[in-house]
């Protein structure tokens, strides 16, 4: 799960899309040796649509993009002639939600490199507290995060990212019967904590998944995860079928001196996300994508409103035959959501992709990612839709049109479909000059 390009399977939070590092069509991935990886990334898609942290993570990403749009549009309104790139946070990030920016860095504790833990054993979980200023409550608040130390001296932080990956990895391994003996950061961190702290429950994968899912219903999942395990070591928690419900009834948080339960937090984030999606994808050209994305969130809301565990119920799939699992995945793609899936050749697959209006709408929405990074990153590596555009335009020369370094040169092109150009124009950025360099 990443918010930047990679050369392996990944899920893009905020865009609800999946990249697969193989050249198969989506239909051929299903039922193939790549299906378990597709399933893993689809779990991240479901996490983003059905958990408070997932929707909040989407809000953080989309709000950053929306702040950029507003900043540039205000520059245009004020008669400014040019803008120097890259944009920095000091330009415009001054009024964002409590769970944004620095807070989310601590909540997430993103781990870029996969580390093999070999035979190391967890020997210490150290809670650290950092004080940050909350622009919403106008006061300093304490944020807890956790440092893990292993027997071989290896140390790492534990956050929401490890919980995200831990759930998807656990389900993939059990359902697709993947025998992986080595433990890796971040995929096994959450389970390592669970198994080391609660050795009597190390084989209770349902309860492990329920705790992970419950933790993702709050802004700081790692804190909920660790504190619940600490409580479980002291008192007799009711594990089993009612574990999730028991947690739901007994766990609340205090935010800005107001006690909030899980439902209130989820409702608040859902409404925020709904608003920012309608702002960023306001133009008619995004209408099909906007309708799809809001529909996914609505389905996620309906699935969550009963507040029953979603992910541990998928363990039933381990009893399915391989063709039955494939049929289930096909159905869930159709019924819950058919996210944009791109293969290694740059070809996107999404529902109704053969319809030209739907195709332009979805591809333009994916180009929002590249426009943001063009404006925000000092070393822009090129629009991430280059291979896609070569394919859809049936034009090998497209790759020589400088979209790697300066996609703005394509904004006046009429003969080629350039989603980057579409985004640029719908936001009105063609009305001001941009300069990069010292």
Image: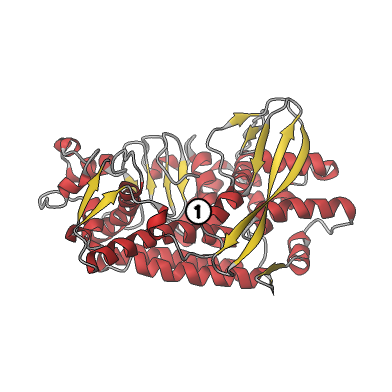
Residue 403 point in image, percent of width and height:
22, 41
Q: Is residue 377 left or right of residue 328?
A: left
Quarter containing the C terminus? top left
220 or 342, which lies in front?
A: 220
Q: Relative to residue 276, is residue 35 depicted above or below?
A: above
Q: Is residue 42 left or right of residue 218?
A: left
Q: Residue at x 60, y 57 (%)?
A: 132
356 or 402, which lies in front?
A: 402
Q: Secondary structure at mark 1?
A: helix
Q: Residue at x 39, y 64 (%)?
A: 292
The answer to whether residue 200 of the structure is visible from this angle is: yes
Tally the marks: 1
Residue at the right extreme, as displayed = 235
- Asked which quadrant contains residue 22, the reply is top left
The answer to whether residue 306 of the structure is visible from this angle is: no
Residue 135 point in image, percent of width and height:
54, 65
Colouring convention used in this rendered image of the protein: secondary structure
Q: Residue at x 44, y 46 (%)?
A: 3
Residue 169 point in image, percent of width and height:
61, 41
- Asked which quadrant contains residue 90, the reply is bottom left
Q: Please rate how many residues cluster around mark 1, counting C-alpha atoms within 10 Å: few if below 14, some from 14 to 19, many from 20.
A: many
Q: Relative to residue 342, is residue 265 depicted above or below?
A: below
Q: Relative to residue 81, is residue 39 depicted above or below?
A: above
Q: Residue at x 62, y 73 (%)?
A: 264
> Disc 1 designates what residue?
45
190 or 241, which lies in front?
A: 190
């Amino acid at each position: 799960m990443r918010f930047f390009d990679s050369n392996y399977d990944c899920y893009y939070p905020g865009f609800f899309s999946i990249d697969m590092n193989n050249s198969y069509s989506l239909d051929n991935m299903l039922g193939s040796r790549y299906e378990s990886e597709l399933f893993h990334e689809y779990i991240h898609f479901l996490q983003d649509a059905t958990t408070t942290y997932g929707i909040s993570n989407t809000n953080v990403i989309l709000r950053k993009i929306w702040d950029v749009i507003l900043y540039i549009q205000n520059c245009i309104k004020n008669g400014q002639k040019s803008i120097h790139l890259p944009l920095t946070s000091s330009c415009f990030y001054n009024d964002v939600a409590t769970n944004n920016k620095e807070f989310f860095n601590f909540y997430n504790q993103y781990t870029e490199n996969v580390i093999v833990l070999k035979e190391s054993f967890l020997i210490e979980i150290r809670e650290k507290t950092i004080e940050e200023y909350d622009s919403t409550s106008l006061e300093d608040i304490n944020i807890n995060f956790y440092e893990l130390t292993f027997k071989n001296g290896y140390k790492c932080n534990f956050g929401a990212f490890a919980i995200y990956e831990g759930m998807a990895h656990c389900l993939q391994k059990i359902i697709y019967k993947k025998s992986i003996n080595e433990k890796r950061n971040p995929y096994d961190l959450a389970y390592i904590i669970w198994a080391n702290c609660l050795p009597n429950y190390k084989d209770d994968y349902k309860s492990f998944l329920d705790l992970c899912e419950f933790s993702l219903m709050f802004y700081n999942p790692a804190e909920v995860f660790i504190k619940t395990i600490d409580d479980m070591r002291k008192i007799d928690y009711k594990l089993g079928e009612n574990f999730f419900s028991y947690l739901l009834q007994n766990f609340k948080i205090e935010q800005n001196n107001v006690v909030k339960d899980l439902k209130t937090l989820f409702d608040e984030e859902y409404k925020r996300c709904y608003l920012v999606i309608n702002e960023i994808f306001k133009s008619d050209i995004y209408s099909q994508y906007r309708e799809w994305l809001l529909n996914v969130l609505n389905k996620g809301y309906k699935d969550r409103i009963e507040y029953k565990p979603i992910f541990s119920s998928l363990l039933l799939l381990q009893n399915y035959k391989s063709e039955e699992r494939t049929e289930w995945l096909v159905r869930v793609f159709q019924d819950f959501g058919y996210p944009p899936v791109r293969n290694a050749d740059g070809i996107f697959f999404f529902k109704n992709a053969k319809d030209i209006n739907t195709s332009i709408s979805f591809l333009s929405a994916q180009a929002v990612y590249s426009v943001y990074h063009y404006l925000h990153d000092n070393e822009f590596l090129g629009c991430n839709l280059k291979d896609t555009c070569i394919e859809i335009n049936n034009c090998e020369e497209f790759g020589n049109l400088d979209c790697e370094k300066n996609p703005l040169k394509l904004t006046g092109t009429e003969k080629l479909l350039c989603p980057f150009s579409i985004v640029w124009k719908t936001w009105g950025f063609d009305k001001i000059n941009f300069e990069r360099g010292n």
